[in-house]
Image: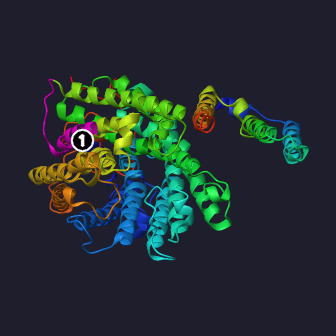
Amino acid sequence: MTEESYPIAHPSYLVDTGKRKGIKAWLTTCDHKRIALLYLWSIMVFFIIGAILGETMRTELFRPGQQFYGPQTYNAIFTLHGLIMIFLIVIPGLTVVFGNFVMPIMIGANDVAFPRLNLFSWYLYILGAAVVVVSQFAGSGPPDTGWTFYAPYSTQTHTNVIAAVSGAFILGFSSILTGINFIVTIHRLRTPKMTFFKMPLLPWAVYATAWIQVLATPIIGITLLMIIGERVFRIGFFDPALGGDPILYQHLFWIYSHPAVYIMILPAMGVITEIIPTFSQRRIFGYKAIAFSSLAIAGVGYFVWGHHMFTSGMSKEAIWVFSLLTFLVAVPSAIKVFNWVTTMYKGSIDLKPPMLYAMAFIFLFTIGGLTGLVQGALATDIQVHDTSFIVAHFHYIIFGGVGFAFLGGLHYWYPKMFGRLYNIRTANIAWGFLFTGFNLLYFPQFVIGLEGMPRRYFDYLPQFTLSQQISTVGGYLLGIGLIIMIVNLFRKSGEKAPDNPWGGKTLEWQLPSPPPEENFSTPPNVSDFPYDYD
Amino acid sequence: MTTEEKHITSYSLYARVLIILMVLTAITITAPSLNLTAFTILIALVIASTKAGIVLTYFMHLKIENTLLRIMVIMVLGIYGSVIILTFADYIYR
């Protein structure tokens, strides 16, 4: 399927062909590719806001004592930073952007199963985001609970918790609807010759993610409603003074929120699995092992939530069980890492920007994953609980993992999405800033966390000053890298992209760049193996 | 798909299911007044689970759906059951 197959009768999806033009055409589109871009723009806007909030926190922490805002403002800012980054960016992130843009094409479909529901999910996402943002400015002041809304504090604080949890509740609906849409799409719309084991591995990852979205998200929805119920009607769910149990909140919250980590990381792993064979020009090693490990991560990931609660007062029997399960979930994650590295072995490695991001992902995710085991072990968890060690671990997984995979995917599919190339050298420089800045920012947090620096404190002892300053400098380098990357990607002067600039084998590379509105005018040919490089 | 198209569920079956659901609801409402102490919650949960099973089987057509969908529902129930067991591993031993 070459560009010649699509003469003038098949214009790019970026061209308005219907009755509506411009912004109206975009806001009413049911095309999965345009909806992916709607999500991309939204997520980028929120990411810039979240990153600026993060930079202000780093600036506040440059020296001990109060610099330019006090503890209450600091609490509100890290809460908003967490809400934006978690609920508006990394949970939907890769699923809605790359799941929407490339997954249907990869399985030979012309769209998702329910295109209108897909657009409705985006509107719900925007509505939920708007409610979260309004919660910062309306009512009795921005929430100061952190993104976890831990009870009983969240049921007692006078800040505007109800609006914030309502926003998260609406965002949950968006996530569930997207999950249902993707499960049905993968079951029903695969091109006839594409069996499950001929499907590329990103759709496998999206499929596993979608199940978590559908099964786990309702639990957080109910839990957030219980917070509202306790605040408004004084129902004693969580407050001991009302006969409730605060640990019940933590159970309910983490029953969703730990699987939510896999909602974030599984599609990231799927993106990396696409990038590595292309830039190594090698067949993926262990196709079925990677596919099943996605399902295994999704499955086992349901049952490890208790490792967030080792110091909360759970029974010791439960703690042992959760610790064991936590170590088990490391196995399928490690399977993926070994398979990626083995795929690269003796490959013809091309260090283009997507591959640099993919390799950075493996490095950073491995550090994040192994330091997670420090917390999964019962004794060491006592030492590091609620310290900046957790901040470092979490960011190595979420930014070093999900974030770098997102940027890798963006650099990988950017020519397909927009039909233009970016400047490779500038992209490499941006990557250098991001990688260096990231490690300078977060690695010192491991060290001072082990030395006892608590997390979520706006002040600290003088002994932590040097590490905090290194972190802040790293944060600024990270910011510079982001600016270079955004300018490089979204300047308008990039040269026209060929259909397959990286030599990929999956179906999206057989379409023109950018693809036509209707992806395939006839069902595409499917090879026996999606990564047939050798 | 062909099974779904061919299968016609009779009104009388739906009516019988409805009556069973209403009877179970009546038992749920009256059970607390019998003062069965800790068993009250157990009875309520058993009845609620039975009702959910009946709704899934008949009203949501699981009885006539293909094997894949049945496996999906069983998987979901398995996860739900495991989550309850793990949570109670804390509550029972705390």
User: Does the magenta-highlighted stretch encompass residue A160?
Assistant: no
Q: Is residue B61 left or right of residue A177?
A: right
Mark 1 residue type: Leu
- In the image, what residue occupies the spot 39% across and 66% down? A75
Stretch in magenta: A346-367
Q: Which image quadrant: the C terminus of chain A?
A: top left
**Which residue is identified by label 1?**
A364
* Secondary structure predominantly adopted by residues drawn in magenta: helix
The correct choice, above or below, for A261 with respect to A458 in the image is above
Q: Is residue A282 left or right of residue A14?
A: left
- Determine the image quadrant of residue B80: top right
- Determine the image quadrant of residue A344: top left
Element carrying mark 1: helix
Residue A331 image offset from top left, x and y in percent: 37, 27
Residue A374 image offset from top left, x and y in percent: 33, 36
The correct choice, above or below, for A526 with respect to A493 in the image is above
- In the image, what residue occupies the spot 32% across and 46% down? A402
Residue A288 image offset from top left, x and y in percent: 37, 23
- Disc 1 packing (10 Å; few <14; some 14–19; many ≥20): many
Whether residue B6 is visible, yes or no, is: yes
User: Does the magenta-highlighted stretch encompass residue A351?
Assistant: yes
The correct choice, above or below, for A55 with respect to A340 in the image is below
